[in-house]
Amino acid sequence: MSDRPRVIDLTHVVEDGMVTYPGLPAPEIGVHLTREASRAVYAEGTTFEIGRIAMVTNTGTYYDAPLHRFADGADLTGVPLERVAAVPGLVVDVRGRSGAGVTAADLAGIDVAGRAVLLRTGHDARWRTPEYAVDGPFLAADGARLLAQAGAVLVGIDAMNIDDTTDGTRPAHTTLLAAGVGVLEHLTNLGALPADGFELHAAPVPVRGLGTFPVRAYAVVRDAG
């Protein structure tokens, strides 16, 4: 029997024309060099395709670095790999609670120090439907303060925004990114994870001058036995 760990994908697929966040443009995916055109470049029988994509950085499942919120914050090149790769993770199932905001009371008593904390709201079931942008769950201001003060290194959510989009001050982004805590938005498939006992990987491309970029978020689960 194989002793290889299970790898669980937590990432939405990016497709041409899809909308991630209402009001932001959809990605445009196409071809820069077609296979037909490449026949004139390479030896007979050898073809290549070079793709092209134009998109805003807030596309699909993505990571926010401090620069996303703060002009003097670290950009993607300043994100230490140990804070986005092989990070001990935990899932906090907040489905069915009262109110849309995940509060400090919902997180009380959980050891989050050095962990990637993933909030399972179940809202990813509405991905790419009009309902995804309506009454989305979020991390409340006091919940963000608790996670930052308790030493979480990354916080993710399977919904449209870590913040209440009706609050223009964006307290969760502000608190977490000021403390150097990375933010993952638009996760999916958190129900396939155990509550504990996995490693999260969600490294963005280190692009200088950007504060947000899509990731391939996935968890590595090493089952006992």
Image (cartoon, helix red, strand yellow):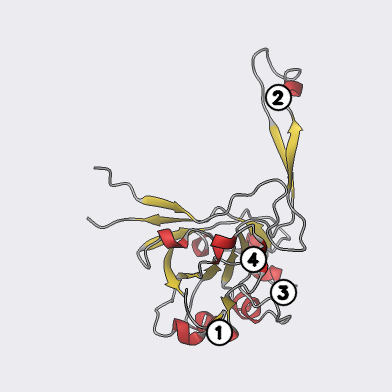
N-terminal label among 1 and 3: 3
Q: Secondary structure at mark 2?
A: helix
* Mark pair 4, 3: CA separation: 30 Å
Q: Earlier in the sequence, mark 2 or mark 1?
A: 2
In the depicted structure, whether residue 88 falls above or below residue 106: above
How far from the left and from the top, in percent, is residue 25? 77, 56
Residues packed near mark 2 inside 10 Å, few (<14), some (14 to 19) or many (20 plus):
some
User: What's the CA distance linking mark 3 and mark 2?
Assistant: 43 Å
Which residue is labeled 3 in the image? 70
Q: Position of residue 177 (x, y in %)?
A: 62, 74
Name, please, the residue furthest toward the top: 44
Q: Quadrant of the C terminus?
A: bottom left
Q: Which residue is mark 4?
A: 131
Sort mark 3 into few (<14), some (14-19) or many (20+) by Cα contacts within 10 Å.
some
Q: Earlier in the sequence, mark 2 or mark 4?
A: 2
Q: Position of residue 66 (x, y in %)?
A: 66, 71
Give the labeled residue for mark 1. Answer: 145
Residue at the image point whose x is 73% and y is 60% from the top: 209
Q: Amino acid at mark 2?
A: Arg
Q: Which residue is mark 2?
A: 35
Q: CA distance from mark 1 to mark 3?
A: 17 Å
Residue 94 or residue 145, whichever sits in front? 94
Q: Is residue 93 left or right of residue 155?
A: left
Disc 4 or 1, which lies upstream in sequence? 4
